[in-house]
Amino acid sequence: MKYNFEQKTVLITGGTSGIGLAAADIFLESGAKVILAGRCPVKGAKALESLSKYSSRVSFIAGDVSRVSDCEKIISQTISLYGQLDIVVNSAGVYLEKAITDMSVEEYETIMDINVKGSYFIAKYAIPYLKKEAGSAIVNVSSDAGLNGNILCTAYCAAKGAVTTFTKALALELAPYNIRVNCVCPGDIATPMLDMQLAGTSNPSDALKEMASIYPLGRIGRAEEAAHVICFLASDAASFVTGAAWTVDGGLTSC
């Protein structure tokens, strides 16, 4: 699918890998200026290298969205770099699979701070600038776990469930300003986050096959498949779509 993001500036948190990086590639191919925000400058440099053919239109900002001050800094630096902000993609996230009785306070806070607080405060500081641009949009990355409960994922489900309902509430709040807010709810996607999850198993290859077996389409997803839905929701093609939670899960949540 072809998009037109000429004259648009896009901020992607968690943009240095996985779904965020795949979305950056599509936005850039479609003419946008893109800012990748992430915690690790080394990953930021690698991401910029992978997008080097767009070097004049892509930048990296180091920041930790679990810190409110960093959220404000990321937005202010985005405006300093490009003078405007049209689209925000809240893709920064962290996953942890653990029983509630084994979850530490620190682990719980990390999951909530990155997944929920980061999305909330990036949006808060972005909104004054989004109001200045026509056809602005926010796309949050939730999860199938933001729609259904998953075993051993109480904290992650709580966080992503919050992202989903936050999306719907913010969509209502910003509709009078013609700012659309939607979220994507991916299932398991082949990303570095999934690699880390599989690395904790005794046999990653068998674990991946077992994971894929529960999907009606018989496989896990690709980062670009989720990224295309993000770009669609941010585009004028979705101009009458707001407050939606779009599943990208191979039919998993239909079971």
Image (cartoon, helix red, strand yellow):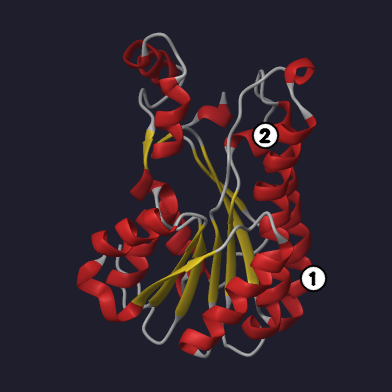
Q: Which one is earlier in the sequence, the residue at label 2 or at label 1?
A: 2
In terms of secondary structure, where does tag 1 sit? helix
Quadrant in which residue 202 is drawn: top left
- Residue 246: tell me if it is visible: yes
**Residue corresponding to mark 1:** 173
Q: For the point 41% across and 73% down, which residue is it?
A: 34
Q: Amino acid at mark 2?
A: Tyr
Instruction: Give coordinates of residue 179: x percent, y percent.
Output: 65, 76
Q: Amino acid at mark 1?
A: Glu
Instruction: Give coordinates of residue 4: x percent, y percent.
Output: 35, 77
Instruction: Give coordinates of residue 101: x percent, y percent.
Output: 79, 16
Quadrant (top left, top right, bottom left, bottom right) of the C terminus: top right
Closer to viewer: mark 2 or mark 1: 2
In the displayed structure, does residue 206 sit left or right of residue 87?
A: left
In terms of secondary structure, where does tag 2 sit? helix
Q: Nearer the viewer, residue 145 or 128?
A: 128
Q: Nearer the viewer, residue 217 or 196?
A: 196
**Residue corresponding to mark 2:** 156
